[in-house]
Amino acid sequence: MDRSDPAVPVIGVGGDLAYATAAPLRAEVDRLLAGRPATLVLDFADLLFLDSTGLSVIVHAWREGQQVGTRIELRAVPRFLETILDLTGVTSLLDRAPVDGRTGPSATGSAASA
């Protein structure tokens, strides 16, 4: 995790995000969202593979972020993940502002640049 700006926590996600590895990421997302940051960043610069369980963690982060008013931002999204997010409709979820009405740049607008 990148702690350079404590107000904007960053979780680096690398390797395979699949059934066997998704639980620790989900736990870290929940831990950080408990602090109700304005934005939580998931950095996928080192992601190699994602299955449906990994995708469900991203959706979980978005859903829980909506509940606490935290915007979920994806950073350094590999092309394969961008395609999965688009095909499954998750991209449109991430573009929605949190329920408390906070607004900001699109969650995926600059995320695709690696």
Image (tube, rainbow, N blue to C red):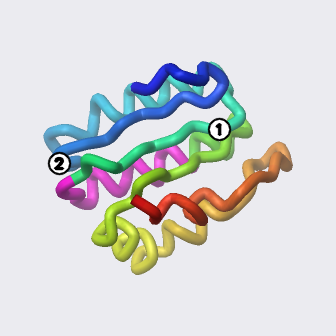
- Point out the image quarter for the N terminus: top left
SS of the residue under disc 2: strand
Against 105, residue 89 (above or below) is: below
- Point out the image quarter for the C terminus: bottom left
Residue type at mark 1? Answer: Thr
Instruction: Name the residue at 71% across, 57% down.
Output: 105
Magenta stretch: helix, strand or loop mostly? helix
Observer-nearest of 5 and 31: 5
Say whether residue 100 is left or right of residue 66: right
Discs 2, 1 touching: Cβ within 8 Å: no
Say whether residue 63 is left or right of residue 105: left
SS of the residue under disc 1: strand
Residue type at mark 2? Answer: Asp
Question: Which label number is shown at residue 113?
Answer: none
Observer-nearest of 71 and 104: 104
Instruction: Name the residue at 60% across, 65% down.
Output: 109
Q: Earlier in the sequence, mark 2 or mark 1?
A: 2
Q: Position of residue 91 (x, y in %)?
A: 53, 68
Q: Position of residue 111 (x, y in %)?
A: 51, 59
Q: Is residue 51 magenta?
A: yes
Is disc 2 surrounded by few (<14), some (14 to 19) or many (20+) residues within 10 Å?
some
Instruction: Name the residue at 27% across, 52% down.
Output: 53
Q: Name the residue carrying label 1.
A: 39
Say whether residue 111 is left or right of residue 12: right
Instruction: Name the residue at 56% across, 61% down.
Output: 110
Q: Which residue is the extreme one toward the bottom?
A: 87
Q: Name the residue carrying label 2.
A: 16
Against 60, residue 97 (above or below) is: below
**Which contiguous range is marked in magenta?**
48-62
